[in-house]
Image (cartoon, grey):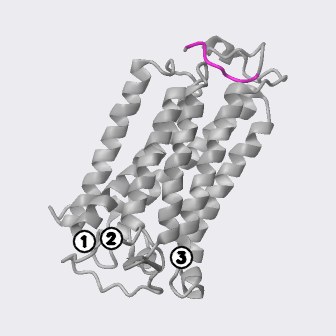
């Protein structure tokens, strides 16, 4: 039996924001019996089921603030504003993650709303990441009102669309996206799991082509590949290791802690990759001379410092 569209197994073995949408749902799915209940730690009289994730999510916000400051100093870098938009969205994602998966919210309604925000932020952040790769090809002048306007408009569309699907499932406004047996919802499955994955894979493919074919270099691929590896490890912790880690730790921690940590490390490495190809000087001539006409100073260096400030 195909598992496409079904969240039952994921919610049984992992800690995901999508699972909170099914709390107190009147849909005809079978009761969920978690393989391991995350109990966490107690801070005073207040239980925190996911203390590690709360700490990592909080640290992520401060790290993003530092990267935003560093990005602001790169006045001539291609996609500077666009990268900052991505970082801002990742900060919003981290805050939403802290609230939706932290395990300290007692109101089901409030928890569902922050889960909706979390899911919408994931889809939107991955979409903006893909747009950052497209900006590298300079089809439009980066940092201009047109470029940023397309970023904002398309991001709002993704955010609102994904948020509506999530909220409709969580609050049962209509029967359009109502979960079926085994927590099945094709709309949520596509926008929460498949769409972000497609955007991330497309980003790494496009950036690999840019580095290898345009810059004619291999050194930046170490950072790009490292970011991809760190992200993949985080997903393995969520979908494979989480339940085993939870049982071994008697419910104190699960894979969501390490997923958030490795995702943060992946974003840091990704920023370092972007910084390296907009600052470092390469000696090799790029394989695609036509990129010189698009604003790439290919004779001085293999990077693509923008001609726009």
- Kind of element beneath mark 1: helix
Residue situated furthest front in the rendering? 44
Please give left or right for residue 281 compared with residue 68 in the image. Answer: right
Residue 178 versus residue 226: which sits nearer the camera? 226
Give the numbered dot on residue 20.
2
Predominant secondary structure in magenta?
Answer: loop
Q: Which residues are magenta?
A: 302-308
Give the numbered dot on residue 108.
1
* Disc nearer the start of the sequence (1/3): 1
Q: Disc 2 and disc 1: Cα gap in Å?
A: 8 Å
* Disc nearer the start of the sequence (2/1): 2
Residue situated furthest right in the rendering? 283
Please tell me how crowded label 1 is: few (under 14), some (14-19), or many (20+) other residues with Cα within 10 Å. few
Q: Disc 3 and disc 2: Cα gap in Å?
A: 17 Å
Please tell me how crowded label 2 is: few (under 14), some (14-19), or many (20+) other residues with Cα within 10 Å. many
Find residue 110 and report its image quarter: bottom left
Give the numbered dot on residue 254.
3
The answer to whether the residue labelled 2 contacts the one labelled 1, judged by CB atoms less than 8 Å apart, is yes
């Amino acid at each position: 039996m195909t598992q496409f569209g079904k969240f039952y197994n994921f919610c049984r073995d992992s800690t995901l924001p999508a699972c909170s949408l099914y709390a107190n749902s009147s849909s005809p799915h079978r009761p969920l019996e978690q393989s391991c209940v995350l109990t966490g730690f107690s801070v005073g009289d207040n239980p925190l089921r996911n203390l590690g994730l709360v700490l990592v999510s909080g640290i992520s916000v401060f790290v993003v603030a530092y990267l935003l400051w560093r990005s602001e100093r790169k006045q001539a870098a291609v996609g500077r504003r666009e990268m900052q938009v991505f970082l801002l969205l990742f900060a919003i994602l981290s805050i939403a993650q802290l609230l939706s998966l932290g395990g300290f919210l007692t109101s089901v309604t409030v928890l569902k709303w922050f889960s909706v925000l979390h899911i919408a932020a994931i889809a939107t952040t991955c979409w903006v990441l893909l747009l950052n790769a497209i900006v590298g090809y300079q089809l439009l002048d980066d940092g201009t009102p047109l470029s940023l306007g397309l970023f904002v408009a398309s991001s709002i569309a993704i955010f609102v669309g994904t948020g509506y699907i999530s909220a409709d499932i969580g609050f049962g406004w209509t029967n359009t996206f109502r979960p079926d047996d085994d927590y099945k919802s094709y709309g949520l499955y596509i926008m929460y799991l498949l769409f972000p994955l497609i955007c991330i894979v497309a980003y790494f493919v496009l950036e690999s082509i840019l580095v290898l074919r345009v810059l004619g270099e291999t050194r930046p691929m170490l950072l790009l590949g490292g970011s991809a590896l760190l992200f993949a490890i985080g997903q393995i912790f969520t979908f494979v290791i989480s339940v085993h880690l939870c049982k071994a730790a008697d419910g104190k921690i699960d894979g969501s802690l390490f997923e958030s940590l490795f995702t943060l490390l992946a974003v840091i490495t990704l920023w370092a990759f972007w910084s390296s190809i907009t600052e470092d000087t390469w000696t090799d001539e790029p394989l695609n001379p036509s990129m010189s006409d698009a604003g790439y100073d290919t004779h001085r260096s293999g990077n693509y410092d923008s001609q726009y400030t």
